[in-house]
Amino acid sequence: MVVPFDRFSGWLERFDSRHPGTRWSVAAGVLQATSPDGTHVSVEIPFAAEDLQTAADVVTHLGRGWRIGVVLVRRGGFAAAYVVGAEIVAAKTGRRHVQGKTKAGGWSQHRFANRRDNQARVAFEAAAGYVERLLLPRIATLDAVVSGGDRRAVETVFADAALQPLTSLPQRWLGGVPDPKRAVLEQAVARARSVTVLIADP
């Protein structure tokens, strides 16, 4: 179950009302609970701070006006955004042509693979340039960086020397995403501002 940050307090209240006597605790960045009826809950806390000890602490933590950099990268496509609270303040999406795979063999396949790698390199360089222009001027205000897409592509982009300051911020990985167009970026921002609640019933 995915619960947006701003709805988590209400979700907790409803859960407690359905499971009286539930005890909550925080350990190793995870909010956990066990109810008298045997229901277990686990919530990984994004951007977790070491001083969180109670469910109320977690609600306060999630309720901050988080300033987040979101970076999505796939081979040939990227999106980046600067998000304050639930608002996308600035964003950029882009594409660069990268050929698909070929079934050709021999020397033709080798040349095709080199061309494809070069196209991907240009695409990643373009993505890194846009991330640099969008997020680095705002780095002093950023609380965290959230990324998603193809992990190797994301790692290649963040390997750019200019983006190293961003890697020192708290990170969150969203996993794979479709080609990062505007709608996909908006969905990723919503996921970046949500927690996943795992419930195990008795």
Image (cartoon, rainbow, N blue to C red):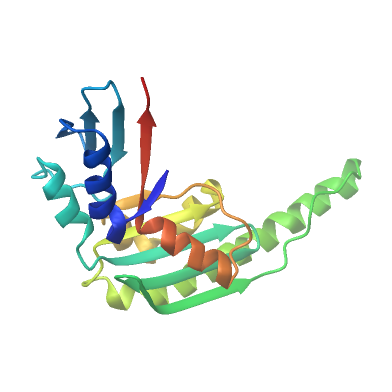
Q: Position of residue 139 (x, y in %)?
A: 27, 71
Q: Quadrant of the N terminus?
A: top left
Q: Position of residue 107 (x, y in %)?
A: 88, 45
In the displayed structure, does residue 115 sit left or right of residue 13? right
Q: Quadrant of the C terminus?
A: top left
Residue under the image location 24 percent in, 33 percent down: 19
Q: Position of residue 158 (x, y in %)?
A: 43, 57
- The answer to whether residue 125 of the structure is visible from this angle is no
Which one is nearer the viewer's eye here, 93 or 200? 200
Which one is nearer the viewer's eye here, 97 or 147? 147
Q: Is residue 2 above or below residue 125?
A: above
Q: Position of residue 64 (x, y in %)?
A: 19, 63
Which one is nearer the viewer's eye here, 137 or 61? 61
Locate residue 142: give its quadrant: bottom left
- The answer to whether residue 87 of the structure is visible from this angle is yes
Locate residue 10: give its quadrant: bottom left
Residue under the image location 11 percent in, 41 percent down: 54
Numbered label tally: 0
In the displayed structure, does residue 41 sit left or right of residue 191? left
Residue under the image location 86 percent in, 48 percent down: 102
Locate residue 21: give its quadrant: top left
